[in-house]
Image: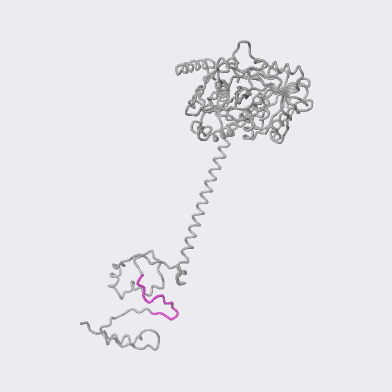
Amino acid sequence: MVGAFEVGPVPFNPDGWGPPESAAAAAATTNSNLPLNVPFAPFSRSDKLGRIADWTRNFNNPSRTKNPADSVFDFSNDDSFPASADDDSSFRLVDGKPPPRPKFGPKWRFQQQRQLPQRRDEEVEARKREAEKERARRDRLYHLNRSNANANRREAAVFKSSVDIQPEWNMHDQIPFSTFSKLSFSVPDPEDLLLCGALEYYDRTYDRITPKNERRLERFKNRNFFKVTTTDDPVIRRLANEDKATVFATDTILSTLMCAPRSVYSWDIVVQRVGNKLFFDKRDGSQLDLLSVHETSQEPLPEAKDDINSAHSLSVEAAYINQNFSQQVLVRDGNKVSFDEPNPFANEGEEVASVAYRYRRWKLDNDMYLVARCEVHSVLELNKNKNFLTLNALNEFDPKYSGVDWRQKLETQRGAVLATELKNNANKLAKWTAQALLAGADMMKLGYVSRIHPRDHFNHVILAVVGYKPRDFAAQINLNTSNMWGIVKSIVDLCMKLNEGKYVLVKDPSKPQVRIYEVPPDAFENDYVEEPLPEEEQVQPPAEGADGVDTTVAANEVEDKQIDDQA
């Protein structure tokens, strides 16, 4: 049986806390059972007592912040316990999980943790500053690259004038496009003076074409297309002799003037003042006979003229596509709608394209009338009424330039395709809409024609055909009829103030403005033009090689053979 525990004498210390030194020494000598050199931590009454004993401390966790108040109970560095150090190093708690931190604790907890969040905030602020510097550096590099890209783009977009300005020409006026946006003029409804030609019916099966059941674009070599200027038109000459109007033009020339603020490429219109009459003409082989492609796009086209994706090559290709498309979507069964007079430009027995010319007259002023020759391409019978149609085709040459692949987007995102075309070909679409409005067409059909392969500019397929009402489409593309007629009226008034003679209206190739030059009376009559093709060769595809006609004929023979084989 264990002996009883005896409590030794407890001496009284009148000088302070703890046992007196003399009493402790005497007790140690008298009682040999007491350990020698027991450490004693002296303290004063001003010291704050944390705890008497802390059984939750873990000195083996180096990440834990040490509390200075716990140093009272730390004897690990005391030489008085040499054997206990090894025991402490091998000792482990069964539950090493740190105790939960109370939400509200003593004041000393907050005093000890106050510096840690401050250091963390400083590190966060330092990271933010570094990230801001990196972002600023990236922005500088980005804007530097963008400025270089724009510089290259501007250099690539240097266009030449559509007509060579001669030194003997006298410039009369210069009109910036900014003045055109403020013009407005309302004209009454026009009257039809004469209808010539014959129209074939539109084939409504083409409205159901999708990219999955595309149709090959055919060629119509035997049908003749006429691009006759104003003063060469026998009907307009007859109307001028009868004093039916003061101003004479065609729908192509009027639409060019009406949509001038949207144009980027250079163009020119010849103005002839004869007596009190005014004639707006185009030169033989003028750029107005072709169709611009990617005119208002930000991406530059290749500058080499012999490149199949250059501006000139694409314009010629688009003109052929437009002609062939306008004849393919017709019901070619011989049933035609004839008008007052036959085609004024065709010889007897000659096969001509389906087209009707409407000579219409507008009243510009009390004693000023304008007569224009307008074209419609087909007729459609709806509810026992014959509706006039205009037929035009948009062409895709390479999806990399537009960024939209028609074969993938036409069925699901047709609006996105049209929006891209409105951005890249704003002037061309506006001119087509203006021509449909001038001709009084009930519907304008837009075809989506694409190359079979991006590098093959001879063979094409029709992917879709969409119809629009001209007035609705004009509102959709923000084409204001009053502003269109305001531009025409201002130019007519300006030209009527000129003396009798010949003038040319030239769009500046690099600035949004037009200039009026006075030219000699024999100007442009014997002018050699490089761009146009002879009338009998208009329906043939352009030559890609340097051998000219021989290359074209050879390509045509190969392609005709391919078409026959497929048939």
Magenta part mainly helix, strand or loop?
loop
**Which x, y percent locates residue 205?**
53, 25
Residue at x 47%, y 60% (from the top left corner) = 120
**Total number of numbered labels?**
0
Bounds of the magenta span? 42-56
Residue at x 39%, y 89% (from the top left corner) = 14
Residue 229 position by quadrant: top right
Judged from this view, the residue extending furthest toward the left is: 1
Lateral position of residue 52 relative to residue 310, left or right: left
> Does residue 12 lie above or below 446 as drawn?
below
Q: Nearer the viewer, residue 535 or 43?
A: 535
Residue 29 within the magenta-colored segment of the rendering:
no
**Which x, y percent locates residue 295?**
59, 30
Lateral position of residue 75 relative to residue 383, left or right: left
Q: Quadrant of the N terminus?
A: bottom left
**Which x, y percent locates residue 345?**
65, 15
The answer to whether residue 169 is visible is no
Q: Nearer the viewer, residue 199 or 483?
A: 199
